[in-house]
Amino acid sequence: MSVDGSIDYSNYTLDDLIQARGSVNRYSYPRNAQMIDHWINVREGKIPSDTLPPEPLPIEADDSTISEEILTVTPEKKKIDEQFSPPRELSFSKVISDTFLIVWNRKTDLLRVLAPLYIIIILIEFLGLLMADQLGVAGGISISIVSSVAYAMFAVTCHRIVLLGNDSIPRFGILVPSKREFSFWGMTIALTLGIAFIGVAFSMATSFFFIGASLHISPWITVIIIGAPFLYFSARMSLAFPAIALDNFQSLGWCWSATRGNGLSLVALLLIPVTPIYLINYFFKENETLMISGAITLAGFAFAILGIIFISLSYKELCVEVEAGSLV
C-alpha cells in the first residue's frame, strides 16, 4: 500500500493528473490529493512551473508508529468503516468538468472504441424500422433485445476505458458480448421494470388522492408525478452499472448506501444528457428530414457518452477505494 505523499507527480501528464484526481481517495490520501491539484495548476498554467509544492498537511502520528496490522484492511475493518463513516459528498461541478476534460483529452480513443458500436446500434435499429412489417411483434421484440445488448456493450466499453484505461478493452471496443455484458443488460432490464413499477404505484397512489380530493391536475403534473420517483430511483441505482462493468457489483443495497445524500445531484447529472435529446425529438420529430435525423443521431451519440462518463466518475468519487496515485 502506498504511503501518503510518497508518489512523485511532477512527471505526470495533464491527462494522467486529471485521471488521478478523479480516483484518489482524498480522505485517506490528502497529501497526494494536494500534490495532484498543485501539478494540475502548473500544467494548466495557473501557477508558474517553478512554484514550490505546498507544505505537507499535518499528520497526527509518525508513520513509523503505524504497524502493518493497522495498514492491512481486513473485510471486518472495511465493514466497520463503511457502517460508521459519513457518506461521501459528490462534487457535482467536478464530475462535469472532469467529464468534459476526459472527452477532450481522450477524444481519439473514445471515438475509436465507441463509434463502431454506435454504428452497429444504429444499423440494428434501422433494420428493425425497415423490416417492421415483415418482422411482426416477435421480430420487433427480438430486434429490441439485440439493440439493447449492443447498447450494453457500448456502455461497458465506455465505463471500462474511462475507469480502467485503454488496455482493459479490445482496440475497437467490445464487439462480442460476454457474461459481463449480459449481466449489464440483465440489470438494465430488471431495474427498468422495477423502477417503472415503483413509478406506476406512486402515480396510482397520488391519483387516488387527487380524485378523492376532487382535484384536476394537468398532464404535465402527471408526468412529473410519475417521472420524479423513476428518476430518483434510477439515479440511486445508477452506480450498479459501472460496478458491473468493473466486475465489482455487490448488491442493490450497496448502491443505495453508496449514493446516500447524493440522490438529487445524481438526478441532475442524469438530466443533463437526457433533456437535450428529449427537446430535440420533441421539436423536430414531426418535421424530421434526413439532415435532422442525422443531427439527432450524432447528438444521441455525444450525449450518451456524456451520461455514461458522468456515472463512471460518480462511481469513482463515491465508491472506488484506490491507492493514492492510481490512475484507475
Image (cartoon, rainbow, N blue to C red):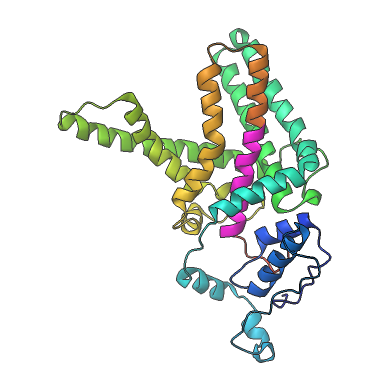
User: What residue lies at 68% left-to-right and 23% top-to-bottom?
Assistant: 122
- Residue 291 shows in this picture: yes
Viewer-closest of 284 and 326 = 284
Image quarter where the C terminus lies is bottom right
Magenta residues (range)? 302-319
Q: Looking at the picture, how far across and down is residue 105, in whole percent?
A: 76, 47
Closer to us: 262 or 149: 262
Q: Which percent across, then down, holds residue 303? A: 62, 35
Give the farthest residue toward the top. Answer: 133
Question: Which quadrant of the structure image shows residue 295?
Answer: top right
Residue toward you, 42 or 206 = 42
Q: Percent position (x, y) of residue 231?
A: 45, 40
- Viewed as shown, does residue 225 lie left or right of 121? left
| Left or right: 47 in relation to 270 | right
In the rendered image, the residue lying farthest to the front is 48
Residue occupying image coordinates x 73% and y 75%: 2
Q: Residue at x 49, y 41 (%)?
A: 191
Residue lying at the far bottom in this picture: please name it. Answer: 65
Residue 94 lies, with reference to residue 305, above or below; the image says below
Q: Quadrant of residue 307?
A: top right
